[in-house]
Image: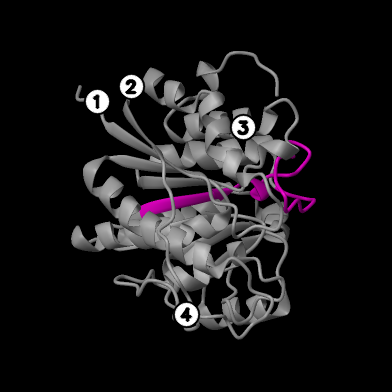
Amino acid sequence: MTRKNCHILGAPVQTGASQAGCLMGPAALRTAGLPEMLQGMGWNVNDLGDMQPENVTVEVHPNDAVHNLAETVGWTRSLSDAAYKAAQASDFPIFLGGDHSLSAGTVSGVARSAAEADRPLFVLWLDAHPDLHTPGSTASGNLHGTPVAYFIGRPGFEAFPPLTHPVDPQNICMMGIRSVDPAEAKKIDKLGICVHDMRAIDERGVAAPLREFIDKVVAANGMLHVSFDVDFLDPTIAPAVGTTVPGGCTFREAHLIMEMLHDSGLVTSLDLVELNPFLDERGRTARLLTDLTASLFGRRVLDRKTGSY
């Protein structure tokens, strides 16, 4: 059987976050053995190292709260191009973050690749937050709260690279949402984005809503990008994140999602974001993310050895 190729690309971005430490995320995931795990599961792994942002100059934004705009635009430019090339050159690119602002670049890049394959891109957004702000609407000024608004083509991103292939908002499914401000809630309703917040997951579990989304991707012959934010998980099992929100998904809920995604055969790219090793406990969050990635790549419950986190 032909071994498939996986490209790993580090994006030590922390300019979009409020706390320092995310730039260590790619190194922590490598230290936790993510590349070796993939190799052990039969993949040819090409670790491309860590990206750097382009040097850009932007005008001062009218919203005084916004900070690190030039750096975030620079990261978006470099990552969009790199993600496109990685999607073209491999069967499965993985982007190691870094804060969630990196998805402005990764999703726009893989969307361009999907469009050239004449297939729509779908996005499964596993996060406590919808990240639907624009630079003009953010009150915190932290641009890791803006990537979804960017890659669906919302106005207000004039400083950013022009989108060639915006993602259709109705091709997005958000799960684990539990921290939404009123402005973002209005946008969700207006755009028709499918959101399964923690109340819905409490009532229905994760399997039924995920299966509905998978069926939608299948019907459209779509490609599926998964963007996994550490704060999707409950902080009791994943403390290494600067935006902890109580009441997140459990260990088994997260593994079930990844196992179902593997069974679907639809996932073509992955973000692992907001890992802040400075806030971790003896590497437990990095190891958990590596283990969840193993489930996405086909590790079964019966394949697992007893371990601790």
| Type of amino acid under label 3 | Ala
Per the model, the C-alpha gap separating discs 1 and 2 is: 6 Å
Quarter of the image that includes the C terminus: top right
Residue farthest toward the top in the current orientation of the protein: 305
Q: Which residue is mark 2?
A: 42
Q: How many marks?
A: 4
Q: Are marks 4 and 3 in contact (CB under 8 Å)?
A: no
Q: Which residue is mark 3?
A: 286
> SS for tag 3?
helix
The residue positioned 33% from the left and 40% from the top of the image is: 92
The quadrant in which residue 236 appears is top right
How many residues crowd mark 1 within 10 Å: few (<14), some (14–19), many (20+)?
few
Residue 228, how many percent across, how many down?
55, 48
| Type of amino acid under label 2 | Gly
How many residues crowd mark 4 within 10 Å: few (<14), some (14–19), many (20+)?
few
Mark yes or no: residue 58 visible. Answer: yes
| Type of amino acid under label 1 | Arg
Q: Which residue is mark 4?
A: 154
| Type of amino acid under label 4 | Arg
Q: Is residue 138 above or below residue 250?
A: below
Q: Nearer the viewer, mark 4 or mark 1?
A: 4
Q: Earlier in the sequence, mark 4 or mark 3?
A: 4
Q: Nearer the viewer, mark 2 or mark 4?
A: 4
Mark yes or no: residue 238 visible. Answer: no
Residue 112, how many percent across, how many down?
28, 62
What secondary structure characterizes most of the magenta part? Answer: loop
Residue 12, how many percent across, how many down?
52, 45
Q: Are marks 2 and 3 in contact (CB under 8 Å)?
A: no
Q: Earlier in the sequence, mark 2 or mark 4?
A: 2
Q: Is residue 151 above or below residue 262?
A: below
